[in-house]
Image (cartoon, rainbow, N blue to C red):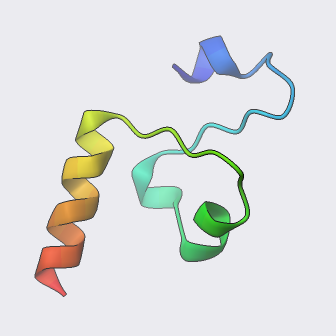
Amino acid sequence: LYKSARNISRVDVSSFSDLNAFSVLKVDKLVLTTGAVEELNASISAS
């Protein structure tokens, strides 16, 4: 996914571990893989 998207202007690809609240809130659109959503749910449930 990273290699495919890196040549598209205004697209930033990050791993789930690199995300933070600011990087999520500053974008107009956010695309997550199923795995990222599962990790997000797990991290929210754990806190």
Q: Nearer the viewer, residue 40 or 18?
A: 40
* Horizontal and vertical percent position of residue 36: 31, 46
Quadrant where the C terminus sits is bottom left
Residue that lies at the very extreme toward the bottom in this rendered image? 47
Q: Residue at x 62, y 12 (%)?
A: 4
Q: Quadrant of residue 20?
A: bottom right
Q: Is residue 35 above or below residue 19?
A: above
* Horizontal and vertical percent position of residue 27: 71, 55
Q: Seen in the image, is 9 located left or right of residue 15?
A: right
Q: Residue at x 42, y 52 (%)?
A: 16
Q: Seen in the image, is 43 located left or right of residue 21?
A: left
Q: Seen in the image, is 15 located left or right of residue 47?
A: right
Q: Residue at x 59, y 62 (%)?
A: 24
Residue that lies at the very extreme toward the top in this rendered image? 4
* Horizontal and vertical percent position of residue 22: 65, 73
Q: Is residue 33 above or below residue 15?
A: above
Q: Seen in the image, is 41 located left or right of residue 7?
A: left
Q: Quadrant of residue 39?
A: bottom left
